[in-house]
Structure formats: structure tokens, C-alpha cells
Image (cartoon, rainbow, N blue to C red):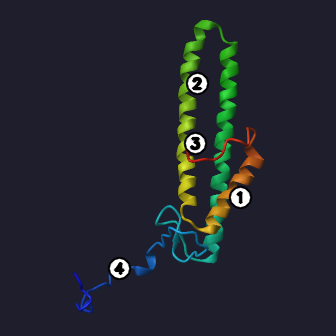
Amino acid sequence: MDHSHMDHGGMDHGGMDHGAMCNMNMLFTWDTTNLCIVFRSWRVTSTLSLLWSLFGIILLTAGYELVREMSRRYEESSSRKIAELHRRNVLAVERRSKLVKAALYAVQVFYSFFIMLLFMTYNGFVMLAVAVGAFIGYLVFGGGSVTKSAACH
């Protein structure tokens, strides 16, 4: 149906804030105009807010490596503790260890999907901040193999 002939001049659009619309790109871009990062409230409105956002993304992404390193250390510690215990005490420690490892794994999965959402802004600045955060995180916290990537899951 063609509505091009209709007059919309009398419609009241006063309650709408057209400046608050998020710019959603599905193609790679460097444009930060009305860029929302994951949440509508995390909006880039100026150069300063872009810089703070990129800094926050770097910290968030580096934090992922911290969680991975904490998980590796817990697993090593737990394995040593189980090896040192007598047979009858092992089951309780193994159950507790498995629960903690499952929780750490869930945090890693959630975290990795959040980073994926950051990357899916398709904004070059955000993508670079994710890569810089991964680099810094690995330098500071990465004690494990470099072959395991920060894949979504």
C-alpha cells in the first residue's frame, strides 16, 4: 500500500527523542555517530565518551584473561589438593571442586559472549579496543597456552 500521498504534518512527534536513537551497523564502520555499545544507555556522544568507552572495553577484555588465569590456577590447585588427600576425603573435595570449576566456566562463557557483543558493534574503534584488551590481558595475566583463543564458546 502506498502512503506517500498522506499528510503526516498534523501528527504529534513532540514526545519522541530522535537524537537518542542508537546507530546499529551491520557492516564495518569507523563512524561513532549515535553509537550505542551493548546497552542503549552506553552511548558515545563525544570524543571524550568514545575514549572512556574504549578504555573501559580494554579493561573489560583484559579482565577476561584474568578470569581465565584464575580458572587455570584453581584447577591446578584443586588437582594438587585431591592428589594429596586420602581416598575417603576425595569425593567431597572433588564435588566442591567441580562446582567451583563449573561456576568459573559459566563466568568465562558469559564474559566471552559479552565480548562478542562488543565486537558485533562492527565499529573499528571498538574492535581495536577488544584486541588491545586481549593483548594487555594476556601480557599481564596469561600464563596458559596461547593456542586457546578468546572464542565465544
Q: Which mark is residue 16?
A: 4
Marks 4 and 1 close (CB-CB < 8 Å)? no
Task: State the separation of the CA atoms marked 1 and 3.
Answer: 19 Å
Q: Residue 147: x percent and y percent?
A: 71, 42
Measured Cα–Cα span from mark 2 to mark 1: 33 Å
Q: For numbered disc 1, what is the local secondary structure?
A: helix
- Rounded to the nearest angstrom, the CA distance separating label 3 from label 4 is 39 Å
Q: Amino acid at mark 3?
A: Gln
Neighbor class of circle 3 (other Cα within 10 Å; few <14, some 14-19, many 20+) is: many
**N-terminal-most mark, 2 or 1:** 2
Give the mark nearer the N terminus: 4 vs 1. Answer: 4
Quadrant position of the C terminus in the picture:
top right
Please name which of the two marks, 2 or 1, marks the residue nearer to the observer. 1
Q: Point out the image quarter for the N terminus.
A: bottom left
Q: CA distance from mark 4 to mark 2?
A: 53 Å
Q: Residue at x 31, y 84 (%)?
A: 13
Residue under numbered circle 3: 108
Tag 1: amino acid:
Val
**Residue nearest the viewer, comparing 142 with 88:** 142
Dot 1 or dot 3: first in sequence order is: 3
Lower position in the chain sequence, tag 2 or tag 3:
2
Question: Mark 4: which amino acid?
Answer: Met
Give the mark nearest the N terminus, 3 or 4.
4
Residues tagged 2 and 3 counted as in contact (Cβ below 8 A) = no
Q: Are marks 3 and 4 in contact (CB under 8 Å)?
A: no
Q: Position of residue 99 (x, y in %)?
A: 53, 27
From the viewer's perspective, is 20 left or right of 5? Answer: right
Left or right, 130 with respect to 99, comes to right
Identify the mark nearer the N-term, 4 or 2: 4
Identify the mark at residue 97; answer none if there is no mark.
2
Residue that mark 1 sits on: 132
Q: Amino acid at mark 2?
A: Ser
